[in-house]
Image (cartoon, rainbow, N blue to C red):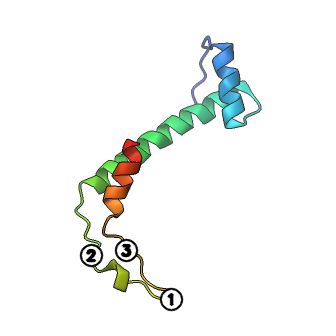
Amino acid sequence: MTRITVDVNDEWLDAARDVLGTDTKVATINAALHAFAVRRQAREIVAAFDQVEMDFSGSVDGWRYGGGRDLDTLAERARDDEAA
């Protein structure tokens, strides 16, 4: 852990505390930093999957117990949702 002294905007800190549900300033700042780190990791994971060609043809027949799921348009739908 690094100990630092910083000036923090109280309104932003209170808003972050409300969103994150934290009790203390330290917990709020750590939770906010963690959230941004996780967000970056998620972007990197999505970018890695975007580099891989996925073939979902025949996915309807590949599922057991209750029928198949057509995943042919999964990537397109995800990109459409992301753009919206």
Residue type marked 1: Tyr
Which quadrant holds residue 22? top right
- Comes first in the chain, label 3 or label 2: 2
Question: Of helix, strand and loop, which one carries label 2?
Answer: loop
Name the residue nearer the viewer: 50 or 48.
Answer: 50
Which quadrant holds residue 57? bottom left
User: Would you say the residues marked 3 and 2 are in contact, meaning their CB atoms lie under 8 Å apart?
Assistant: no
- Can see residue 27? no
Q: CA distance from mark 3 to mark 1?
A: 15 Å
Relative to residue 20, is residue 64 drawn left or right? left
Name the residue nearer the viewer: 57 or 11.
Answer: 57
In the image, residue 28 sits, relative to residue 48, either above or below, namely: above
In this rendering, which labeled residue sits more in front, label 3 or label 1?
Answer: 3
In the image, residue 20 sits, relative to residue 60, either above or below, namely: above
Please give the residue where the numbered disc 1 appears in the rendered image.
65
Name the residue nearer the viewer: 27 or 78.
Answer: 78
Q: Residues within 10 Å of mark 3 (few under 14, many from 20)?
A: some
Relative to residue 83, is residue 9 drawn left or right? right
Name the residue nearer the viewer: 37 or 61.
Answer: 61
Q: CA distance from mark 3 to mark 2?
A: 8 Å
Instruction: Please name the residue shown 31% across and 57% down the image.
Output: 76
Please give the residue where the numbered disc 2 appears in the rendered image.
57
Instruction: Please name the residue shown 61% across and 23% down the image.
Output: 3
In the rendering, at what x and y percent does residue 75 appear? 32, 59
- Comes first in the chain, label 3 or label 1: 1
Q: Which mark is residue 70?
A: 3
Which quadrant holds residue 56? bottom left
Q: Residues within 10 Å of mark 1 (few under 14, many from 20)?
A: few
Residue occupying the far right of the picture? 23
Q: How many marks?
A: 3
Question: Of helix, strand and loop, which one carries label 1?
Answer: loop
In the image, residue 28 sits, relative to residue 81, either above or below, namely: above
